[in-house]
Image (spheres, helix red, strand yellow):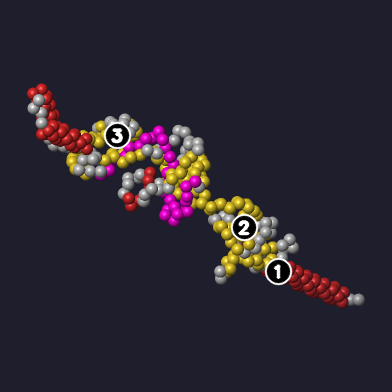
Amino acid sequence: MTKRCWRWQTMSTKWRMEDWFKRQSRVLLIGVCCAGLIVSMSACSFSSQSEEAELIELIQSPKISKKPEYKVAKSTIELKVNATGKLMSKRQESLHFLSNSGQIVEVLVEPGEKVSKGQLLAVIDTGNLENQIKRKEIEIRQAELNMTEKIRANTRTEVDDLNFELLKSEMEELKAQREASRLTAPFSGTLVSFNKKIGDAIKAYEPVGVLSDMSALTVAAKFSASDLEKIAIGMEATVNINTAGTHSGKVARLPLSSESSGKDDSLDLYVLIELNPFPADVQAGTPLSISVVTERKQDAVLIPPSALKKASGRNYVQVVDENGNKREVDVEVGLTTATEVEIVKGLEPGQRVIGQ
């Protein structure tokens, strides 16, 4: 083999080897790209499936909550009427002058003061009434002296007796006018209010104040007209007194007059409740709340109001048995409160009914 041929063969082998390496590199590069594409597509596919699964989970319909079930029970049901009130004195009077008219010239006490029976509280102007009384006293004294002399001289006549009686009658009339101008306490107690001052004009029997005996208190409350029709003397009551707790009592008296009578916060306007025992260390005016039982039924078949259904004048309930089967049952309703309904006919204790 010539030297030229050997050199040619060597170069040819080198070219073939370089061409082979280039082809292998391209194949490897294509393989890597394909692998990357496959991984990317797998990731996208997995992500899409996850989002789809999450979406399916989100749009699943919510579970419907089970309605409550109640056991039909036997117990006592009570109808009550409620009102607010306060502690008031059992003896309380409105104060007024007896004089026809006049102007107040003296006020001797202030609201909140304790006074004694007969104590002078206020006076109205009477003009020259005191002078008239003094002159009349003198006239009577002169008439007595004249009468004494005539008796001694045996010259006393029936006219003398009539004139003397007339003088005494005139004196009594003047003193009555003076008494009517003076306001005194009818009993010992506390002056709750006095709404007149010096210089104010008053009329006969016009209320000017209130006197109360704070040593004897009672529970007083005002009920609405509709509730008042349901209350009777002797009914049981529960009284909650501020700062003094809850106490049991009975209706002792119904109102003796209405608001239109014009009485100044008189006991006659209130329902009175008797407590036994009456709480100690309480004061007049303390606010309270009262609940009076107007009707009570023992051993009544009861369900909650939410279990009673109404439609077109029909009262019914849904009863469920031990196997979960439901059926509608018509019922007859008795007493009803905010928390209980009496079933007169249609249910038995122990059954279960469905609420709303």
Q: Identify the secondary structure beneath mark 2.
A: strand
Q: Are marks 2 and 3 in contact (CB under 8 Å)?
A: no
Q: Which mark is residue 49?
A: 1
Q: Give the residue type at disc 3.
A: Ala
Q: Amino acid at mark 1?
A: Gln
Image point 25% across, 43% down: which residue?
Answer: 205
Q: Position of residue 42 (x, y in %)?
A: 73, 69
* Labelled pair 1, 2 in contact (Cβ < 8 Å): no
Task: Please indicate, yes or no, whether residue 148 appears anywhere in the rendered image.
Answer: yes
N-terminal label among 1 and 2: 1
Give how far across and how far down residue 295 sits, in percent. Answer: 53, 52
Distance from the alpha carbon under mark 1 to that under mark 2: 53 Å
Residue 185: give its label.
3
Q: In the current view of this chain or complex, which residue is farthest to the right?
A: 1
Q: Is residue 20 above or below residue 114?
A: below
Mark 1, mark 3: which one is toward the viewer? 3
72 or 189: nearer the eye? Answer: 189
> In the depicted view, which residue is nearer to us: 217 or 37?
217
- Placement of the N terminus among the 4 image quadrants: bottom right
> What residue lies at 70% left-to-right and 69% top-to-bottom?
49
What's the residue at 67%, 63% (across, down)? 319
For residue 149, which quarter of the picture? top left
Give residue 164's mark.
Answer: none
N-terminal of the pair, mark 1 or mark 3, is 1
Q: In the shown orientation, is residue 63 left or right of residue 225?
A: right
Q: How far apart are the alpha carbons under marks 2 and 3?
A: 59 Å
Q: Is residue 308 above or below residue 260?
A: below
Q: In this view of the protein, which residue sits in the foreground, 147 or 35?
A: 147
Magenta region: which residues? 206-234
Question: Does 216 appear in magenta?
Answer: yes
